[in-house]
Image (cartoon, rainbow, N blue to C red):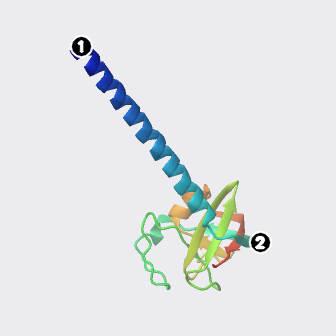
Amino acid sequence: MRGRLAQREVGLLCVAVLAAAVSSAITNRQKHQAAAASLPSPVGAYTALVAASGPRVVGTKTRCGVVIATRTMGITSPVLACGVRLYLTYRGRHVLAPVIGRGPNAPIAEFAVTPALAHRLGMSGVKRLAWSYAAES
């Protein structure tokens, strides 16, 4: 009798753990869908030459007041206002990032991206990227 009771308790524990795992998976999926639904819509379709900034920019402070860290995802632009968010696309990778400074320092490029953003996009040097504005809500 005691053995059956222990088996029953173990079985109930397994059902409870399974229910918690399913509940967690459903909640995470709903959060992911809500986050994707809350992203701003892209506006416009443009291309530009974009320079990947080197590691020398890490630790510097931009004219927008942002100190660039190794994980900072940002864009520098000579004409766009600080805080404007852009979608950048390169080789199928899409990233939403803010303008964090003035630049670029490369005379041929229209924008520059931080090392972390260049890494996320999978680019180096100066490349032609697609970009669009992120609609403000």
| Residue 109 in view (yes/no) | no
How far apart are the two marked residues, 1 and 2, measured between alpha carbons?
A: 74 Å
**Residue type at mark 2?**
Tyr
Q: Nearer the viewer, residue 36 or 5?
A: 5
The residue most toward the right is 45
Q: Is residue 111 visible?
A: yes
Q: Quadrant of residue 89?
A: bottom right
Q: How many marks?
A: 2
In the rendered view, would you say 5 is above or below 54?
above
In the drawing, does residue 20 fall left or right of residue 53?
A: left
Q: Residue at x 62, y 84 (%)?
A: 78
The numbered dot on residue 46 is 2
Which quarter of the picture shows residue 21? top left
Q: Which tag, 1 or 2, sits closer to the chain's start?
A: 1
Instruction: State the residue position of label 1.
Output: 1
Q: Position of residue 135 (x, y in %)?
A: 67, 76
Disc 2 is placed on an element classified as strand
Residue at 61 percent of width and 55 percent of height: 122
Q: Which mark is residue 117?
A: none
